[in-house]
Image: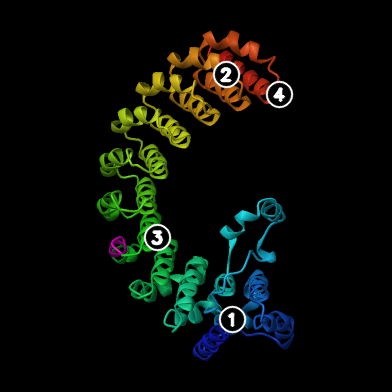
C-alpha cells in the first residue's frame, strides 16, 4: 500500500514540476530543507506534520510548493497533527480518545492546506493536480483551491473545478462541490444543481451546502425538492441552504419538512424558518414546541423569537415549563424578543427556575418588555444566589425605570 502511494507521488511530482515558484534565496531553501525532507518520511504522521508546519509559514514556504504538490496523492489516514491542534483541543481529545477519529487527516490533506496558505505560487500546481491520475490528488487539489484566500486568485480555477465536478470518483466530486461553495460564484450554480441529483449522498449534501453559500435564488426550487431526498444528511443540508438564501418561496416546503422523521432535519428546518421570518410558519412551529427532541424544541423557540409574532407568546410561556433547561432558556429569550406584556407572569415565575441560565434570561426578557408589574419579582431577584442573575435583574430594573 505504501509502495503504491509512493509511485503515485512520484508521478505527480513530474507533472507539477513546471509550477512557477516565487523567487527565493539559498538561505530560504536551506531553512525549508529539513521540513521538505520530512515530506518523504516513511511515517505518514511525520509527513502530515511536516506539511502542516510548512503551511504555517504561508508564503515563506513557496520554495516547497513542488514538494507539497507531490504529496497530494497521499491519502493515508493519521491522527490529528501536533501543529494543527490547540492546547485546549489536545486536552479534550486526551480526555475523550473516541473523538480522535473526527480530527483524522492525511499527508495529502495537510499538503493541500499548506498549498492554500502559500497562495498564488501554489495556484497553478493545484489546478494541474485536478487532472492527476490519483483521485486522492484530485480531491485534495480541489480542497486546497477552496481553502485558498480569494485575493490569491483562486477564482481563476473556477472553469477547471466546474469541469472536474463530473469526475468519476465521488470523493473528488464532493471536494469540488465544497470548493465551489467556498468560491461562491454564480457561474457554478448550474453544475451544483446537477450535483444535487448525484448518486452519492456526500456529493448531494456538499452541493446543497455550496448552493447555500452562493445564495442564488435560482436554487430555491431544486433545494425544496431536496428536502425529500432519501438521505437525512441531504435533507438537513438543503434546509440549511434554504435558510441561508432566505427566500419566502421556501416556507411551504420547509413547513412540510418540519414533520421529517429525523430530528436532525427538523432542527435545521426550524432554524431555516427562523431565518426566513415568515409568520405563515407560526402554527407548525408552535406545534414543534412539543417535539420529542429537546434540540428541536430549543431551535423552534429560537425561530419563534426571530419571527416575533405575538401569536407565539402563550405557547412560549408554556415552554418555560419544559423539562429541558436549554429549551426554557431559549423560550425566555424569545419572549424578550417579542416584547409582549402577556409574558410577564410566566417570566416572573421563571425567575425562580432551578437553572441559573433560565433565571438570568428571564430577567433579561423582563427588562426588554419593561412592564412595571415586573418590578417586584425583579427586586426579589436582586437577592438571587447567582451574581449573574442579580446583575441582570439590576439591569432590568433600570430598564423599567427608563420607561416610566
C-alpha span from label 2 to label 4 = 19 Å
Q: Quadrant of the N terminus?
A: bottom right
- Residue hosting label 4: 387
- Residue hosting label 2: 399
Q: Quadrant of residue 305?
A: top left
Q: Are marks 1 and 3 in contact (CB under 8 Å)?
A: no
x and y percentages locating residue 100 in the rendered image: 62, 58
C-alpha span from label 1 to label 4 = 55 Å
Q: Residues within 10 Å of mark 2 (few under 14, many from 20)?
A: some
Give the mark, 3 or 2, whose residue is nearer the N terminus: 3
Q: Does residue 173 show up magenta in the picture? A: no
x and y percentages locating residue 174 in the rendered image: 41, 66
Say which residue appears at 50% left-offset and 77% top-offset. 123
C-alpha span from label 1 to label 3 = 28 Å
- Residue hosting label 3: 206
Task: Identify the magenta region.
Answer: 193-198
Amino acid at each position: 500500500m505504501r509502495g503504491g502511494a509512493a509511485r503515485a507521488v512520484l508521478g505527480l511530482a513530474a507533472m507539477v514540476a513546471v509550477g512557477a515558484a516565487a523567487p527565493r534565496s539559498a538561505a530560504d531553501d536551506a531553512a525549508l530543507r529539513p521540513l521538505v525532507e520530512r515530506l518523504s518520511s516513511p511515517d505518514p504522521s511525520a509527513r502530515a506534520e511536516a506539511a502542516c508546519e510548512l503551511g504555517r509559514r504561508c508564503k515563506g514556504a513557496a520554495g516547497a510548493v513542488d514538494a507539497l504538490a507531490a504529496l497530494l496523492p497521499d491519502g493515508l489516514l493519521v491522527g490529528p497533527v501536533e501543529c494543527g491542534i490547540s492546547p485546549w483541543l489536545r486536552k479534550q481529545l486526551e480526555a475523550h480518545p473516541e473523538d480522535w477519529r473526527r480530527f483524522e487527516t492525511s499527508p495529502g490533506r495537510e499538503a493541500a492546506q499548506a498549498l492554500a496558505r502559500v497562495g498564488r505560487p501554489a495556484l497553478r500546481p493545484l489546478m494541474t493536480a485536478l487532472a492527476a491520475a490519483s483521485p486522492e490528488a484530485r480531491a485534495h487539489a480541489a480542497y486546497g483551491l477552496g481553502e485558498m484566500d480569494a485575493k490569491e486568485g483562486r477564482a481563476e480555477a473556477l472553469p477547471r473545478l466546474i469541469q472536474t465536478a463530473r469526475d468519476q470518483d465521488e470523493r473528488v466530486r464532493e471536494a469540488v462541490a465544497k470548493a465551489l461553495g467556498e468560491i461562491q460564484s454564480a457561474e457554478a450554480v448550474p453544475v451544483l444543481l446537477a450535483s444535487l441529483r448525484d448518486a452519492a449522498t456526500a456529493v448531494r449534501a456538499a452541493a446543497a451546502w455550496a448552493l447555500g453559500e452562493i445564495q442564488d435564488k435560482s436554487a430555491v426550487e431544486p433545494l425544496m425538492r431536496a428536502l425529500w431526498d432519501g438521505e437525512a444528511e441531504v435533507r438537513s443540508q438543503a434546509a440549511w441552504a434554504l435558510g441561508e438564501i432566505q427566500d419566502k418561496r421556501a416556507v411551504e416546503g420547509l413547513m412540510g419538512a418540519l414533520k421529517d422523521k429525523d430530528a436532525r432535519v427538523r432542527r435545521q428546518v426550524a432554524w431555516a424558518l427562523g431565518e426566513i421570518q415568515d409568520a405563515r410558519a407560526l402554527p407548525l412551529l408552535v406545534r414543534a414546541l412539543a417535539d420529542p427532541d429537546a434540540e428541536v424544541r430549543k431551535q423552534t423557540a429560537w425561530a419563534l423569537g426571530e419571527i416575533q409574532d405575538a401569536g407565539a407568546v402563550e405557547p412560549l410561556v408554556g415552554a418555560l415549563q419544559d423539562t429541558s433547561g436549554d429549551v426554557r432558556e431559549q423560550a425566555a429569550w424569545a419572549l424578550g424578543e417579542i416584547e409582549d406584556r402577556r409574558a410577564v407572569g410566566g417570566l416572573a415565575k421563571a425567575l425562580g427556575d432551578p437553572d441559573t441560565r433560565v433565571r438570568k434570561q428571564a430577567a433579561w426578557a423582563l427588562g426588554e418588555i419593561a412592564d412595571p408589574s415586573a418590578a417586584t419579582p425583579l427586586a426579589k431577584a436582586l437577592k438571587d444566589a447567582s451574581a449573574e442573575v442579580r446583575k441582570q435583574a439590576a439591569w432590568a430594573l433600570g430598564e423599567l425605570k427608563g420607561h416610566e
